[in-house]
Image: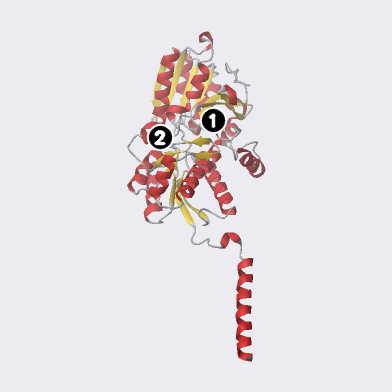
């Protein structure tokens, strides 16, 4: 009898201890299992590093939030990030490596659009869902079914907001003669296509329409020609380093067009760091903005203000975060890491991101997003559409500050 009592007591103590242990294990660790690995590459060094680093920061903040809430499908999220050194070939190599060697669960990466376009082919070959910037329409019109832009940075859309705003001005206030200098790659050429279409519609005479190869180390000859030809609007269709070089040359040569429109570079924080007040009044575009009334924007702005001492999150921080939001909703919606199930869910459901709600067409694209930006007093301001404007546009461009 005594032996039975001892056995019963031992069993009771064992169960009690086990229950106590379970109660003391952190909730995130219960059922966490093997981490979900998201892999790919970004340009963390080289020509596009300024942008790539902000994308990475946005992605890592997303992961920090997700893991704090118990992970994705109840599993911790980790990144496998390679530095492609701003090289398209390396972006492709690392995408292949992430899929075939690292056996990642989910794919990311590819910046700028030339890299994203190349990685799309890798994603399609391995049937991996790929959420990225895309870069231009032709990227998405190659018959791929696993690629999504959410939100995309489309060359064909980037200046749409600017031109729509320009169209609201009386004809006698618009520029008359345009100088167009374009980086010779698919993204640059898509910007050029947009300019060709709109300048024809607005009856702006394109007197210079030239391409250049990256990197643009000296823009002196380009600005001399634009000034000699009396061009009153300048389109600098390149990335951050090209834009900085062009603005410096324009000031040095005292070139005063009514407007300067710059491809991608003016919306990154280093624009103001490099150019100061000389970087003001440059127009550009975006498909995402940090002050729009979408859930999560206030929280991200507060985080960036505290961590990076900036007034609001840089737009590419937001892009990195939003691309991960889209991927997250595809996974949670499909309740699986099965790539075809994730793809099919994204094709048939709305996603909600800091860029707003999006549904995808047969190409994996949402409806066009056409915001126009302008640098005013060192900040990226939204100037079009008017109903979301954060500052009145400054036009014509004031003279250079001496």
- Which residue lies at the image location 40% right of the left edge and 45% below the top edge? 343
Residue neighbourhood size for the residue with mark 1, other residues' Cα within 10 Å, grouped as few (<14), some (14–19), many (≥20): many
Q: Position of residue 7 (x, y in %)?
A: 60, 85
Disc 2/disc 1 C-alpha distance (Å): 30 Å
- Which residue lies at the image location 40% right of the left edge and 48% below the top edge? 341
Q: Is residue 282 visible?
A: yes
* Residue labelled with disc 2: 361
The residue closer to the viewer here, 23 or 243, is: 23
Q: Position of residue 362 (x, y in %)?
A: 37, 36
The local secondary structure at tag 2 comes to loop
Q: Position of residue 13 (x, y in %)?
A: 63, 79
Side of 371 where 185 appears, left or right: left
Side of 28 where 264 appears, left or right: left
Relative to 18, say whether 226 is above or below. above
Asked if marks 2 and 1 touch (Cβ < 8 Å), the reply is no
The residue closer to the viewer here, 94 or 75, is: 75
Q: Position of residue 239 (x, y in %)?
A: 48, 32
Residue neighbourhood size for the residue with mark 2, other residues' Cα within 10 Å, grouped as few (<14), some (14–19), many (≥20): few
* Residue labelled with disc 1: 266
The residue closer to the viewer here, 37 or 225, is: 37
Q: Nearer the viewer, mark 2 or mark 1?
A: 2
The extreme top residue here reads 172
Q: Is residue 219 visible?
A: no
Relative to 222, say whether 359 is above or below. below
Relative to 83, say whether 48 is above or below. above
Image-quadrant location for residue 117: top left
Split into 4 quadrants, where in the image is the C terminus?
top right
- Which residue lies at the image location 60% right of the left edge and 73% below the top edge? 18
């Amino acid at each position: 009898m005594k032996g039975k009592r001892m056995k019963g007591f031992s069993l009771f103590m064992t169960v009690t201890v086990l229950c106590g242990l379970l109660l003391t294990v952190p909730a995130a660790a219960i059922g966490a299992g093997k981490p979900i690995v998201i892999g790919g590459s970004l340009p963390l060094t080289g020509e596009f590093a300024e942008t790539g680093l902000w994308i990475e920061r946005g992605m890592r903040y997303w992961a920090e939030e997700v893991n704090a809430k118990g992970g994705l499908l109840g599993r911790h999220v980790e990144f496998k990030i390679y530095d492609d050194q701003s090289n398209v070939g390396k972006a492709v190599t690392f995408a292949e490596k992430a899929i075939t060697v690292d056996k990642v669960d989910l794919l990311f990466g590819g910046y700028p659009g030339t890299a994203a376009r190349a990685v799309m082919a890798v994603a399609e070959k391995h049937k991996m869902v790929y959420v990225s910037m895309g870069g231009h329409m032709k990227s998405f019109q190659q018959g791929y079914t696993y690629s999504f832009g959410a939100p995309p940075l489309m060359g064909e859309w980037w200046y749409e907001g600017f031109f729509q705003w320009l169209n609201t001005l009386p004809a006698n206030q618009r520029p008359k003669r345009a100088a167009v200098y374009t980086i010779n790659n698919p993204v640059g050429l898509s910007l050029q296509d947009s300019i060709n279409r709109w300048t024809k519609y607005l009856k702006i005479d394109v007197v210079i329409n030239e391409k250049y190869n990256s990197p643009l180390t000296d823009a002196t000859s380009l600005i001399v020609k634009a000034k000699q030809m009396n061009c009153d609007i300048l389109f600098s269709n390149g990335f951050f380093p090209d834009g900085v070089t062009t603005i410096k040359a324009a000031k040095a040569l005292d070139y005063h067009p009514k407007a300067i429109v710059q491809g991608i570079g003016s919306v990154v924080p280093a624009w103001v760091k490099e150019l100061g007040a000389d970087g003001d009044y440059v127009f550009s575009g975006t498909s995402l903005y940090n002050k729009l009334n979408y859930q999560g924007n206030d929280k991200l702005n507060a985080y960036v203000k505290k961590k990076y001492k900036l007034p609001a999150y840089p737009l590419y921080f937001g892009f990195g975060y939003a691309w991960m939001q889209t991927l997250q909703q595809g996974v949670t919606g499909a309740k699986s890491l099965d790539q075809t199930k994730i793809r099919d869910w994204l094709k048939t459901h709305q996603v909600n991101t800091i860029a707003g709600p999006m549904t995808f067409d047969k190409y994996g694209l949402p409806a066009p997003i056409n915001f126009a930006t302008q640098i005013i007093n060192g900040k990226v301001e939204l100037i079009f559409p008017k109903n979301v404007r954060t500052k009145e546009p400054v036009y014509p461009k004031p003279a250079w500050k001496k």
